[in-house]
Amino acid sequence: MINLEAIWQTPVNALPFKYFVAENLFQSSDLEALDEDFPRLEQPGTFPLQEVDYGPAFARLLEQVRSRDFIYLIGKKLQINLTQKPLLVSVRGHSRLSDGRIHTDSKSRVVSCALYLNKDWHATNGRLRMLRNSSSYSRAYTEVTPDAGTLVALKRSDRSWHGHLPYEGPRRCLLLNWMWSRPKREIERIRHRVSSRVKRAVV
C-alpha cells in the first residue's frame, strides 16, 4: 500500500534536526479506500486505536506501518535502530484552535511520524512547519501541506521544534511514535485513552 521506494528516495534534512517529508505514497485507488475506511472522528484530540472503529483498508495500512520492513526503513533514514523500540500508534481526525502549538515532542519519544490522509487540503493554516525556535512560526525550514499520502518523520531532539498555525476542522492523520521504553509507551497510551473517553462523554 505505502510506496516504500518513494520513502527511500526522499532526502533527509539534517539541520537543525533530522527529518524528512515523503509525498504521494499511495495510489489513487488506495486513497479512495482509506478515505472511506478512516475512523469517523468529530472530536479533537489523539485517539488510541482501541477506542476507534475503522474499515479494512485502514486495517491494511496499520499492518504495513507495523511491519518490520517499514520500521527498518524509517530507522535507516533517521540513522537509529527502531526495530527493538516499542511503537505507539494513534489517530487524529479533527483539529481545534488550540492545537499546533510549537513543541519538540516528549523526551519519552525517539522518532515521531505523521501520515496525513486529508483529501484536497486548501487551508493556509494547519500546515505543519519545521521551525528554528520555540517562539515564532514565521522562520520555518519547511512547511508541509497535510495532503493524503504525505508522511513526515522526525528524530526527536531538544531542537526539533514544529507546529502549525491555528486551524479548526477535519485534519486526519495517523500518528506513529517510537518510544524509549514499554512503560513510557503504556503511560502515554493510558493518557490518550482517558482523554478520548472524556472528550466523547462531554459531546
Image (cartoon, rainbow, N blue to C red):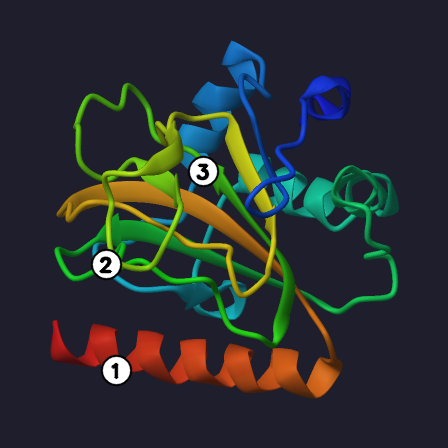
Q: Is residue 167 above or below residue 45?
A: above
- Dot placed on the residue nearer the N-terminal end, 1 or 2: 2
- Distance between the alpha carbons at the discs numbered 3 and 1: 24 Å
- Distance between the alpha carbons at the discs numbered 1 and 2: 17 Å
**Which tag is nearer the camera, tag 1 or tag 2?**
2
| SS for dot 2 | loop
Observer-nearest of 57 and 134? 134
Which amino acid, by three-letter code, is at mark 2? Asp
Horizontal relation, residue 3 to residue 35: left or right: right
The quarter of the displayed image where residue 181 is located: bottom right
Q: Position of residue 95 (x, y in %)?
A: 22, 52
Identity of the residue drawn at 59% across and 43% down: 153
Which amino acid, by three-letter code, is at mark 3? Asp
Horizontal relation, residue 165 to residue 155: left or right: left
Q: Which mark is residue 198?
A: 1
Mark 1 surroundings within 10 Å by alpha-carbon count, few (fewer than 14), some (14 through 19), many (20 or more): few
- Dot placed on the residue nearer the N-terminal end, 2 or 3: 3
The residue indicated by pointer 3 is: 37
